[in-house]
Image (cartoon, grey):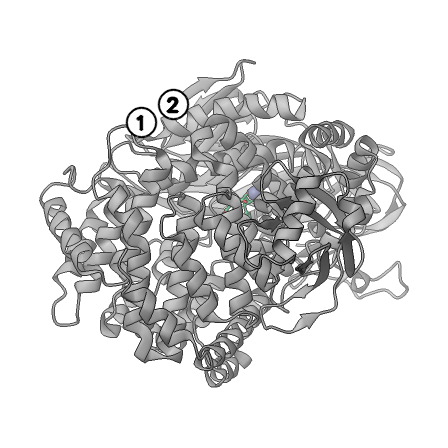
Amino acid sequence: MAMAMAMEQGPQQSVEQFKGQARLPKFAVPRRYDLSFKPDLSACTFTGAVQITIDVIDPTHFLVLNSAELAVRDGSVSFKSHYFDKELRPSEIVLVEGDEILVLKFDEVLPIGTGVLAIGFEGTLTDRMKGFYRSVYEHNGEKKNMAVTQFEPADARRCFPCWDEPACKATFKITLEVPSELVALSNMPVIDEKIDGSLKMLSFQESPIMSTYLVAIVIGLFDYVEGSTTDGIKVRVYCQVGKSNQGKFALDVAVKTLDVYKKYFNEPYPLPKLDMVAIPDFAAGAMENYGLVTYRESALLYDEHHSAAANKQRVATVVAHELAHQWFGNLVTMEWWTHLWLNEGFATWVSYLSADSLFPEWKIWTQFLDETTGGLRLDALAESHPIEVDINHANEIDEIFDAISYMKGASVIRMLQSYLGANVFQKSLALYIKRFAWSNAKTEDLWAALEEISGEPVNLIMNSWTKQKGYPVVSVKVSADSLEFEQSQFLSSGLTGDGQWMVPITICFGSYDAQKKFLLKTKIKKLDKLDFSDASDISHTLVEQGGQRKGGQSWIKVNIEQTGFYRVQYDDQLTAGLRYAIEAKQLSETDRFGILDDSFALCMACKQTTSSLISLMSAYREELSYTVVSQMISMSYKLANMIAEATPELLNETKLFLINLLQFSAEKLGWDPKEGESHLDAMLRGEILTALAELGHESTLHEAVRRFTAFLDDRNTPLLPPDIRRPAYIAVMQTVTATNKSGYDSLLRVYKETDLSQEKVRILGCLSSCPDAAVVLDVLNFILTPAVRSQDVVYGLGGISRKGRETAWIWLKENWEFISKTWGSGFLITRFVSSIVSPFSSDEKAKEIEAFFSTRIKPSISRTLKQSLERVGNNARWINYIKNDKELGEVVRELAYRKY
Ligand code: BES
Ligand code: ZN
């Protein structure tokens, strides 16, 4: 290797000037990569060579590019300018580890113009599920390695030296030398194959211009199924040998989705083929590599006999999401990670569009409210961040793949679409895609396209949503001749922030035919008689609501269909009117959801009593909407946990109330699927029975155990179809104790015997719900064993029972070193922190947790830890508030024993 020479002085002369920078200097940029790799799958190493055609834009002595964990081969680095016919060798090669950059210094100045930089290097196939890594699978009873890449956000540099930034787009020509019996895939199709004994040399067609984070390679043994779009694009789903039937559903979705997007974006899928591959070890859910999308098995494979309706929906939405990126992200790419939400928020939103057109019966736009509520939940924390967030170092990128970029991002897009209208919106997107195809864009560029087509001040409106964190709660007050709106920043701590937004307000008066909308630009706005003069039914509703007939048979709902990203707090009269509307079944699913969820959030923030929330919930007894009931169930868990801490004497009655609340729908759905029933009913049944099992409902537990016993004898028994396995597993774990573990042992046996990832994940997600802390400890220790793939460990952390909480915390502390070593380099580590820390509910605990992490904090978990601790504080505050709720006991008791 070239010797490091003494540092020269002067700003243009020193390697130092390149350290600690967020982004690479741009005096030279890549145009084309000619890459070749030869992996050794047994030794888990690889050798590579790259020739990068670069444009020198400013004369320079330096080339600065990214590289990490790669050994540059001695004497392998050279630069050949097209200007003069000689090869230059760097006088200095410095790998700056902390910044993951490779600085090459040349004694001669590199002139403006094109040149070729050649580098030979070596690396390791790690187990860290990023860069170029190995994944393990079994074939004919034998363990084998496959080699896989995962480069987003900034790990292409772990595979080859490159300008590893989204705006440094280039073309890629890839060559692989691999064992001849294996399948090797990359972004583009193979154009040449030479077999040389046990090895083969594969050349892939050169890619169009694209970002480094989208380059991909997969090498292993696979089967596939194949289809084709109406344009003749070949689509394949690759999976482990013997599982190709399980790829058919995703294949069908992909083929149809490509056609949907072609129409929607008014732009065909631009590559000659699309491959989708199931990878047994995969950190994220899926990755949109251009032309070669990689997935967790559970997000791609669908087994007719053992996958649940929820699994099917997950496969369809993940595929739709990743294919949306082929346009939004791959063809048009964010200029920098600050605009990550343009990728993720959009792909999330667009995936609903596709799922809705393929499966209208799923009512997927109603389910979209799970995204909105997820965004609202995180964004109510003081420790949230704006959608557009500054990124100053590569290690800060991982943490912004969060509910803000995805869920809030998708929700503000939906809000804007509904404000501008679907037609205008689609036209603007098509314009944006055309304008920035094969290039990069910023958030403002999208707003400009929307502004051009719509004529609305999109930039002004949207800046208030993407450049500041948080969102408003809009309080609404009614009088006989006016409606008053006031916005203030909503925080789940109950404090009020000082943010202000441009809020698209929509109002519905007693019927979906009487609507009004306006943009709330100021803190307060009063709509009076004059504003309503055009519609007499509106003034009529107002008089009824605000006038003499208090709580009359009329209602006013704000934020129609919940398309706005904000909360609404109604005055007492409006609240009474809405309750009437719910009971009289006059509101849509989405509006019923919104009223419930806003009320829950206000309650958590101590702005509305828990007794009033419980009383509102009782109006939802006859609710049969999957999305609304699921939301009510997740609220119920939280509520029961808080009441257990605050007023334990009310816990049993609270559970009785919640069981009572679910009886109506439980009886309607029963245990057995009905002939020809809907997808949503199948999912709802699972949710309700799970909740009843968690709440300790005796006959549910009993029936579940009976069915589980039949399942143990026959995995195909009609008594336990996939949609009701989760409730059965949860029920079984409620019966397990440290001295009688047979149910647990049986579940572990099913876990070990199945080769379906979805089944393993389903089981993992139920184990720690056991109320016996000693069993929870067993479960937590189990998830750290090799029996559980490191990608799946997070499922075992979900749903830890209240009684296992303290044990889990002690376990986390005791195992922190191992956990941090094993998962610390990826984003999965954050889940250990959030799952175990956030459910606590006392300030003392928060202090203890803070103290533990004070010496162990790293950039990759710092935001998550702060958010989790904030949640603990909020829980503590809520508990105090519940303790002071004088009406709670009476309300709970009355509803617990009410006969319907
Ligand atoms: N681009 C992401 C994958 C990713 C996530 C890369 C985090 C690096 C860090 C991909 O498009 C994605 O968003 N996947 C989701 C699934 C999707 C359906 C929401 C995921 O992995 O959870
Ligand atoms: Zn994505």
Q: Is residue 418 left or right of residue 593?
A: right
Question: Who is closer to the viewer here, 823 or 98?
Answer: 823
Q: Secondary structure at mark 1?
A: helix
Q: Is residue 62 above or below residue 453?
A: below
| Relative image position of residue 663 (x, y in whole percent) | 27, 53
Q: Which residue is mark 2?
A: 225
Q: Is 826 or 413 nearer to us in this picture?
A: 413
Q: In the rendered view, would you say 519 is above or below 175?
A: below
Taking the spot 10% from the left edge, 45% from the top edge, the residue there is: 710
Q: Residue 864, how many percent across, how many down?
A: 55, 66
Label 1 neighbourhood size at 10 Å, few (<14), some (14-19), many (20+)? some
Query: Residue at (25%, 69%) from the top-left corner?
Result: 771
- Closest to the observer, 436 or 24: 436
Q: Earlier in the sequence, mark 1 or mark 2?
A: 2
Work out whether 421 lies above or below 470: above
**Image quadrant for the N terminus?**
bottom right
Q: Quadrant of ligand 2?
A: top right
Question: Do we see residue 176 in this rendering?
Answer: no
- The amino acid on which the numbered mark 2 sits, given as a three-letter code, is Val
Q: Are marks 1 and 2 in contact (CB under 8 Å)?
A: yes
* Residue for badge 1: 245
Alpha-carbon span between mark 1 and mark 2: 8 Å
Q: Is mark 2 within 8 Å of ligand 1?
A: no
The tag on residue 874 is none
